[in-house]
Image: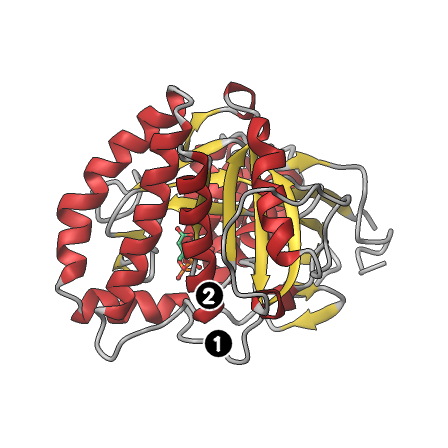
Amino acid sequence: MSVYTASTTAPVNIATLKYWGKRDKTLNLPTNSSISVTLSQKDLRTLTSAACSETFKEDRLWLNGKEESLSSERTRACLGDLKKLRSELEAADASLPKLSTYGLHIVSENNFPTAAGLASSAAGFAALVVAIAKLYKLPQDMSELSKIARKGSGSACRSLFGGYVAWEMGDQTDGEDSKAVEVAPLGHWPGMKAAILVVSDDKKDTPSTSGMQLTVATSDLFQHRIKDLVPKRFVEMKESILNKDFPTFAELTMKDSNSFHAVCLDSYPPIFYLNDTSKKIIKLIHKLNELEGEVIAAYTFDAGPNAVVYYEEKNESKVLGFLYKVFHQVEGWKKQEVPSTLNFEFDDQLYKGVSKVILTEIGPGPQETEESLVNELGLPK
Ligand code: DP6
């Protein structure tokens, strides 16, 4: 019995121009284009192994050590597309084993706790699609594969590339032009760093899928966002990346995060993802930029209270020294930073709202790996 296997890792990405709103919810077609920075897999990544064999009767999935049902339509849509591409290869070359007819075993693990509330679905779907594409030896490039990952979770399409990535919304109804593309590779502007402040939260607000549906259906401000704001920002942000113009990139990033949370508040009933800790972090970053006399740090928040602070390596001691002064009691610092000598007032209890800091940086796209999560029988190790 032959068991075929392939493994890959895939990164997390954090949008600087947010995807919020679908024009087609089955195909995950967005109402606007978006931009993200891919984060290093040293700190945050999903490792996925895919196996198939003539003896596997059905498709099965194990996530972080636990078997999960494969009933989700989104996962089925990804598997269906990948099997179809494989069957086209098999139809063109009769000597190929008929992997498209075999059951698939997929085993996936994150190197960070899912409980941290960090978007793991993007890395998860990206890794799933790339692992199976490798197993099936598909010739499609990353942009083509991103269209499949998109059906799993919209933001996942951007995790197929490293560096600076755009998801072009496209305008076709079949979604064939709604795909991720590279804006600039990692090496173009390698000094981009990210400090993630994991903000403790007792309960989750609306999941992003239903949250964006509500916004599309009820927010008037949203129309202004997708028609006027984002198309202009999309061009300007790409330009700021190509010019390595941090102040412009940072200002657009912060404004777009605020605009996204504004349309959440403008939804009816309103959606709140930022909590008091998040809001105080926003104020702090503005204070830092004001005291420095230039924009050296940018915050952004997704569908939850965690802050991601982008900054350039050359300003690392300034940004981390500033954050260290406020959050030094929190775990996750890589070394003892020199606390900022800047004089500013802050809530000395604020650190209690943050459970962890994750210091990371920009990183590459999915990576081939020798590491495998399946044994010779194609079952989790
Ligand atoms: C706020 O990609 O998780 O993080 O397509 O419904 O799976 P689905 O949504 P998802 O939404 C991400 C929203 C966001 C912004 C972004 O990543 O661009």
Reply above or below: 165 against 280.
above
Residue 115 lies in what quarter of the image?
Answer: bottom right
Check the picture and name the quadrant holding the C terminus: bottom right
Q: Residues within 10 Å of mark 1 (few under 14, many from 20)?
A: few
Q: Dot 1: what SS? A: loop
Reply above or below: 208 against 373.
below
Check contact, mark 1 vs mark 2: CB within 8 A: yes
Q: Foreground: 138 or 231?
A: 231
Identify the residue position indicated by label 1 in the image. Answer: 204
Q: Foreground: 363 or 330?
A: 330
Q: Foreground: 124 or 325?
A: 325
Is residue 360 at least partly visible in the picture?
Answer: yes
> What is the x, y in percent for residue 312?
53, 31
Ligand 1 position by quadrant: bottom left
Label ID, residue 343: none
Q: Dot 2: what SS? A: loop
> What is the x, y in percent for residue 246?
42, 29
Give the residue displayed 38% in from the left and 31% down from the top: 247
Label ID, residue 304: 2
Q: Earlier in the sequence, mark 1 or mark 2?
A: 1
> What is the x, y in percent for residue 276?
44, 70
Compared across the picture, whether 15 is left or right of 332 comes to left
Amino acid type, mark 1:
Lys
> Gap between marks 1 and 2, in whole Å?
7 Å
Compared across the picture, whether 346 is left or right of 371 comes to left
> What is the x, y in percent for residue 163?
52, 31
Give the residue displayed 50% in from the left and 51% down from the top: 344
Residue 216 lies in what quarter of the image?
Answer: bottom left
Label total for image: 2
Amino acid type, mark 2:
Gly
